[in-house]
Image: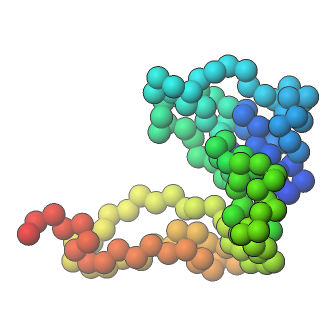
Amino acid sequence: PIPSCSASYPYRCANGACANSTTECTSLGTQVTTFCDGFGVTRCEDGTCRPYGKCGKYQGCSLSKPYYCAGRIQSCVAGEFFCTLQDQTTCAQNCMRDLPVLEYSTQLPKDGSVQLDVAIDTSNTPRTRLAVAAGAFNTSN
């Protein structure tokens, strides 16, 4: 997946690179000039144009909210200004918002519940779990 941007380079440029601002994206030559939004095609976080729903995986902020607010509850916003809004509270430590999500392909038991660890921190402690109750996907009445 495309890695997330850091606090040092919090802005995701249209080509997937990280920079300090939109101005830096332009000066570094990392802005993408090809228009690809519309007609069933969209710009992906790696800078490529692909059909809707076919973009690759990425961590961190999307192109729709490309600015990373380090230490804030809402970590991805439209621009630096939004990091300082009153309702944007500080998250001092252990925010857990930057944990990558695990990819699963599993079969659910027909008559049993299952619990999947979706995000695990560096000490292998599950931080997000998905619990599926027995019969949750039963389509017969």
**Camera-nearest residue between 96 and 75:** 75
Coloring applied to the structure:
rainbow
Residue 1 visible in the picture: no
Q: Quadrant of the C terminus?
A: bottom left
The residue at 76%/56% (across/down) is: 82
Q: Kindly give the residue lying farthest to the left in the view shown.
A: 141
Q: Is residue 51 left or right of residue 15?
A: left
Residue 74 visible in the picture: yes
The percent position of residue 62, horizontal first and vertical second, equals: 65, 46
* In the image, residue 33 above or below residue 51: above
The percent position of residue 116, horizontal first and vertical second, equals: 45, 72
Q: Is residue 22 left or right of residue 52?
A: right
The residue at 47%/39% (across/down) is: 53
The quarter holding residue 86 reads: bottom right
The residue at 38%/62% (across/down) is: 106
* In the image, residue 7 above or below residue 92: above
The percent position of residue 87, horizontal first and vertical second, equals: 71, 69
The percent position of residue 54, horizontal first and vertical second, equals: 49, 36
The residue at 73%/32% (across/down) is: 15
The quarter holding residue 84 reads: bottom right
